[in-house]
Structure formats: structure tokens, C-alpha cells
């Protein structure tokens, strides 16, 4: 899964909002904000990967093919024709 998919980027932006707000408020320096933004992308990628793997429908387990049951019992001796 690509980390640049739209749902990953959207979630990364949502996760980066508090970091950007702390940077604008002055609690974090520009270097701190820049250092934390890739972690927002990584967290978004991990969250989307987890959610897509959980919500993906299960595939049926491979089962060996069963022997077809005969419609009539098999005779070991042939019957004579009339």
C-alpha cells in the first residue's frame, strides 16, 4: 500500500493539525514541527493499513476437493444383457 494514497494523506493532515497548532502558538520550534510531521504520515499509514486489513472480507480457506459420491452403488460383477 502506498503511503501517498488520499486516505493516508487526509488522515496525516488531521494528525498533523495539533502539531501545526503547537508550532503556530509558539510551544514548538520550527525544527520540532518539521521533525514531527513525518511521524504523522507514518502513523496515518499504519492506521489505514490496520483498518483496511481488518475490514477486508475473509477469503475462504482452500479446501481439498471432495470425491464425488456415486449416484448408484458400483457392482463388482457386470450384469448379463437380456
Image (cartoon, rainbow, N blue to C red):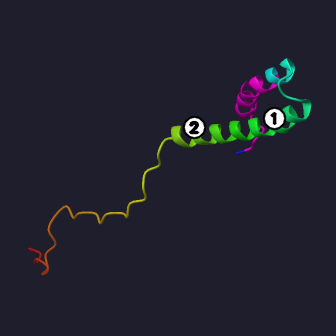
Residue appearing at x 76%, y 23% in the figure: 17
Q: Quadrant of the N terminus?
A: top right
- Relative vertical location of residue 62 with respect to residue 35 in this rendering, above or below: below
**Residue 54 located within the stretch drawn in magenta:** no
Q: Which residue is mark 2?
A: 51
The prevailing secondary structure element of the residues shown in magenta is: helix
Residue appearing at x 16%, y 72% in the figure: 74
**Residue placed furthest toward the front:** 27
Q: Quadrant of residue 29?
A: top right
Q: Nearer the viewer, residue 77 or 56?
A: 56
- Relative vertical location of residue 36 with respect to residue 68 in this rendering, above or below: above
Numbered label attached to residue 37: 1
| Distance of label 1 from label 2 (alpha carbons) | 21 Å
- Relative vertical location of residue 67 with respect to residue 22 in this rendering, above or below: below
- For the residues bearing labels 1 and 2, Cβ distance under 8 angstroms: no
**Residue 12 located within the stretch drawn in magenta:** yes
**Residue placed furthest toward the bottom:** 77
Q: Nearer the viewer, residue 80 or 19?
A: 19
* Residue 57 drawn at (x, y percent): 49, 41
**Left or right: where does residue 5 sit relative to residue 31?**
left
**Span colored in magenta:** 2-20
Q: Quadrant of residue 9?
A: top right
* SS at mark 1 in the image: helix
Residue appearing at x 21%, y 64% in the figure: 70
* Residue 62 drawn at (x, y percent): 43, 59
Amino acid at each position: 500500500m502506498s503511503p501517498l494514497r488520499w486516505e493516508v494523506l487526509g488522515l496525516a493532515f488531521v494528525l498533523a493539525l495539533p502539531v501545526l497548532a503547537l508550532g503556530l502558538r509558539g510551544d514548538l520550534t520550527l525544527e520540532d514541527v518539521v521533525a514531527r510531521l513525518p511521524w504523522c504520515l507514518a502513523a496515518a499509514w499504519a492506521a489505514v493499513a490496520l483498518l483496511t486489513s481488518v475490514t477486508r472480507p475473509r477469503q475462504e480457506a482452500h479446501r481439498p476437493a471432495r470425491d464425488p459420491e456415486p449416484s448408484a452403488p458400483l457392482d463388482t460383477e457386470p450384469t448379463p444383457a437380456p
